[in-house]
Image (cartoon, grey):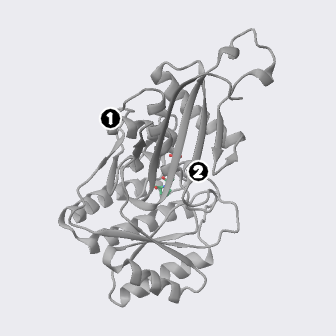
Amino acid sequence: SDDGACVGFAAASADANIALVKYWGKADERLILPRSSSLSLTLDGLSTRTEVRFLETPGNDAQVKDDDLVMRDTLTIDGKPQSGRALERVSGFLDIVRSMAGLEGTVANVASWNTVPYGAGLASSASAFAALAAAASRAAGLWLSPRELSRLARRGSGSACRSVFGGLVRWNAGVSDETSYAEPIDGSKLNLAIVVVSVSEGVKPLSSREAMERTVATSPLYDAWIRSCAKDMEEAMKAVEYGDLELLGRVTEANSMGMHSTMMTARPPILYWLPQSVAILRAVQGIRADGVGAWSTMDAGPNVKVLVDAGDALSVADELKERVPGCKVSVHMSGHAVRFEEC
Ligand code: 2P0
């Protein structure tokens, strides 16, 4: 239903990000506080644009007994109306925005578009919730600082707090809603790019949310992983400060392998890798053995992302296509902070 009076409209876009030091596991599930700090690179070319409209709901009061007449939030993704889980998650997030803005009596219409089709394994919840947090807060009349926006985006999806900013971004784990936020870090001594190597997905993957919960609860390696993340963050921050791509690459690859080790040792085990993923991991090692800087990282799916100097990105992409026939590659430079559209 769309017959309520519009009380606010806004649109915003956000880029996806890839973690070099990963977030894997929550200390607080409701507030989405992570068990460790993480470091990411925001990527151009993988983004979400979202429009949010809040409407008054004069018919939603107590005397309306006919359920069909009660107005509810609506959500479309890439033109397709959503219901069930996807809508519930967005509605739950909008409740946070509504209570911040005193708009409890409203419903929202949300429309979202991804530059990469939703479901392709690349459209991420990071760009989605960063764009939604920006558009929804602005439509609700809230003018949040970048840090406040990062904290809000975190409530939708942890990694989304990093997509509020461009370039290299650090998410400070923190111990509370106020202290868990992302911030941009000075990456001017590096010129990074990511080559995304995608593998066709056959199986329906386990969501990262469920996978990380199971890992925290059951992997005997989990505590060791959290300790190693603190060290990885220190080394990665030093590498960024000194412009040491080699060190940043080594930390990135090792940190990803460590995270996947905790998944493989969860019970029951979680394995996102496919045979093609392993072929790509080996091709990256081979490219490095030939003297070109390239380091792999993987997330909650079978695709491999390769960290390179921007100047090597196209040649590494060509080399990967040659070494792993049938894989699809795309090159992504450093991306930008959230963009608001004035209306
Ligand atoms: C990351 N990932 O740091 C890690 C590495 C995937 C592997 O953040 O439950 O969608 O919404 O906070 O952010 C993906 O998990 O999980 C993720 P929630 P999210 O990028």
Is 262 in front, or is 313? 313
Disc 2 marks a residue whose amino acid type is: Arg
Secondary structure type for disc 1: loop
Secondary structure type for disc 2: helix
Question: Residue pushed farthest top?
Answer: 63
Placement of 117 over or under 170, stated as above or below: below
Disc 1 marks a residue whose amino acid type is: Ser
Cα distance in 3D space between marks 2 and 1: 34 Å
| Residue located at (41% from left, 61% from top) | 43
Q: Quadrant of the N terminus?
A: top right
| Residue located at (34% from left, 85% from top) | 292
The first of marks 2 and 1 along the sequence is 1
**Disc 2 CB within 8 Å of nearest ligand 1 atom:** no
| Residue located at (71% from left, 10% from top) | 62
Give the side of residue 53 with respect to residue 38, left or right: right
The picture places residue 304, in percent across and down from the top left corner, at 51, 71
Numbered circle sitting on residue 145? 1
How packed mark 1 is, by other alpha carbons closer than 10 Å (few <14, some 14-19, many 20 or more), is: few
| Residue located at (49% from left, 78% from top) | 281
Q: Nearer the viewer, mark 2 or mark 1?
A: 1
Is 86 in front, or is 64? 64
Q: Is residue 306 visible?
A: yes
The picture places residue 202, in percent across and down from the top left corner, at 70, 68
Placement of 18 over or under 244, stated as above or below: above
Q: Is residue 32 visible?
A: no
**Disc 1 CB within 8 Å of nearest ligand 1 atom:** no
Residue placed under numbered mark 2 in the picture: 214
Q: Quadrant of the C terminus?
A: top left
The picture places residue 69, in percent across and down from the top left corner, at 77, 21
Query: Mark 2 and 1 residues: CB-CB less than 8 Å, in contact?
Result: no
